[in-house]
Image (cartoon, helix red, strand yellow):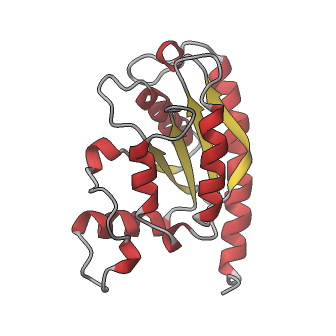
Amino acid sequence: MPDALDLLVIYGSVRPHRQGIKAAKFLVEACRGRGHQTTLIDPLEERLPLLEKMYKEYEKGQAPEILERLATRIRVADAFIIVSGEYNHSIPPALSNLLDHFLEEYFWRPSAIVCYSAGAFGGVRAAMQLRAMLSELGTPSIPSLLPVPRVQDAFDEEGHPREEIYHQRAARFLSELEWYARALKTARLAGVPY
């Protein structure tokens, strides 16, 4: 598919019985259904160490293998979909740790925020903090959010939504992300400011 994008879905929880992974699975399948190459990055599987040294602070070729692998994967992505829960009105520590290991690897590509919670607000308080963080990392988020209230009830274990509205909301959300991702991809080909 000529307009296909390379997308990363970055999930942020390592808790037992985590519910947001169902939303992340839904997004992966929704992106693939639109013809995009899509990879899920899950901190539970990656087992990153607590941040002591950013990837860029290692001498070339000296970073741990996991950081080299993730940096390579992040560099080739056209856009990032961040799936974040809300922990104490903020973002999960595992997500912050994963994101903070990298910096320049994100530059000049958009991000989009999917936020969730067990309650009625769908994680939007965490999303506001995440929006500022993503901008500082060089991957500003698109204007729209995809909040998921009562995430424990919204999807089955495989990530299939229990209500059709999630397909419609995701389609609008992903259309917006695609527009930004394609626009910035074209702009990157012409060069970046520095």
Place residue 186 in its image quadrant.
bottom right
Locate residue 138 relative to residue 92 in the image: left or right. right
Quarter of the image with the N terminus in it: bottom right
Q: Nearer the viewer, residue 144 or 51?
A: 51
Residue at point 44% right, 16% down?
A: 156
Q: Is residue 142 visible?
A: yes
Residue that appears at 63% across and 40% down: 127
Residue 22 in the image: above or below residue 178: above
- Residue 84 rendering spot, x and y as whole percentages: 52, 38
Q: Which image quarter is the C terminus in?
A: bottom right
The residue shown at (53%, 36%) is 27
Describe residue 180's horizontal placement relative to residue 151 as left or right.
Answer: right
**Where does residue 37 sit, x and y in percent of width and height?**
48, 52
Q: Quadrant of residue 44?
A: top left
The residue at the far front in this view is: 88
Q: Is residue 3 visible?
A: no
Location of residue 52 in the rendering, given as x and y in whole percent from the top left corner: 32, 66
Left or right for 32, reference 185: left
- Counting every numbered tag in the picture gives 0
Comparing 98 with 174, the one in front is 98
Residue positioned 38% across, 19% down in the render: 157
**Would you place residue 118 above or below residue 138 in this image?**
above
